[in-house]
Amino acid sequence: MKIRLMGTGGADGVPAFYSDSRVSVYARKHGGKDIRSRSAALVDDSIKIDLGPDSWMQIVRDGLDARDWTALMFTHSDADHFAPDELMYALYPFNDCEFVGFVIYANMAICRRILDKFPDWPFEMHTTKSFETFKHAGYDILPVRAHHLESEDAHNYVISDGDRKLLYGTDTGIWDQPTWEALQDHKLDCLILECSEGFASTNYDGHLDANEFMSVIERLNKQGSIHAGTQIWTTHHSHQGEATHDELLKFFTPHGINVGYDGVVIEF
């Protein structure tokens, strides 16, 4: 399997809109891996995870074609992950297509918003629920509940092709017990995990800082969900986390953890 991290930034990206934070100023000056668009990913060139406001730019930057997608899966409805207006460009009158080539998988809140916005458009949608596995094109996909939103069933995803297994988790917080228990049954070959708060922890419990990230890794290791061969990558970094890419490398590399960046392709 492989996963492309199309974006690795938090809600307002790095550098951030309307901000002169230290990390934003550094990113504007140095560019490169310190430029982070809003988080999204693509599994095996066909399963798209989240469709945020930077989607068009990410596709063009990476030389991709959205017509290759067979599935579009949403994690939750925060604006940096769910930009519903972008869906209209897949259909007539913006092109000659009468149907889109991908199936939409999303929680009830997102499905309702799409139906409200496009009541007569021919989108094929399936409502997803945490801890209920569904199948798509030879993949088994398990949504697990993120500790992020009380208003909806926010997902992280375990994706398996029958041989290799991936967990993609942005906006996780520290999982509640049902999620830990669900993950006990899975041996992960690759883990993508958010580190939104970096070195600047806040009282908000819907995101991880660097130390909380390490505590999650320790618990996953103890319960056998990850092992020495598991690739571990960070994503969803906020400028407010007070960490440049190099500073994140200095913290995570000694632990065998990779720092994600926009456009990186991870094979496992």
Image (cartoon, rainbow, N blue to C red):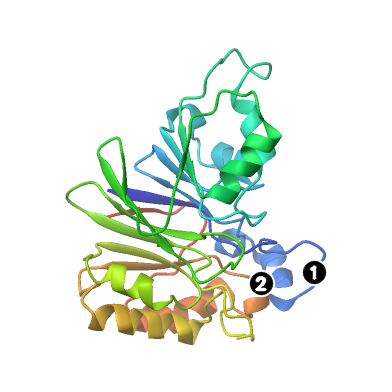
Nearer-N-terminus badge (1/2): 1
- For residue 19, the mark is 1
- Where disc 2 sits, the SS reads helix
Would you say the residues marked 1 and 2 are in contact, meaning their CB atoms lie under 8 Å apart?
A: yes
- In the image, residue 162 above or below residue 258: above
Q: How crowded is the residue under tag 1: few (<14 C-alpha within 10 Å), some, or many (20+)?
A: some
Q: Residue at x 39, y 70 (%)?
A: 258
Of all residues, the one furthest to the top in this rendering is 96
Q: Residue 253 in the image: state x and y as whole percent.
A: 38, 78
15 to the left or right of 108:
right
Q: Residue at x 64, y 55 (%)?
A: 80
Q: Residue 84 in the image: state x and y as whole percent.
A: 65, 41
157 to the left or right of 235:
left
Q: Residue at x 61, y 42 (%)?
A: 112
Front residue of this view, candidates 186 and 58 = 186
Of all residues, the one furthest to the left in this rendering is 163
154 to the left or right of 54:
left
Distance Cα–Cα, label 1 vs label 2: 9 Å
Q: Amino acid at mark 1?
A: Ser
Q: Amino acid at mark 2?
A: His
Q: Residue at x 37, y 50 (%)?
A: 3
- For residue 100, the mark is none
Of all residues, the one furthest to the right in this rendering is 18
- In the image, residue 151 above or below residue 92: below
Q: Residue 266 in the image: state x and y as whole percent.
A: 35, 55
Q: Residue 93 in the image: state x and y as whole percent.
A: 68, 16
- Where disc 1 sits, the SS reads loop
Q: Is residue 80 visible?
A: yes
Q: Which residue is mark 2?
A: 239
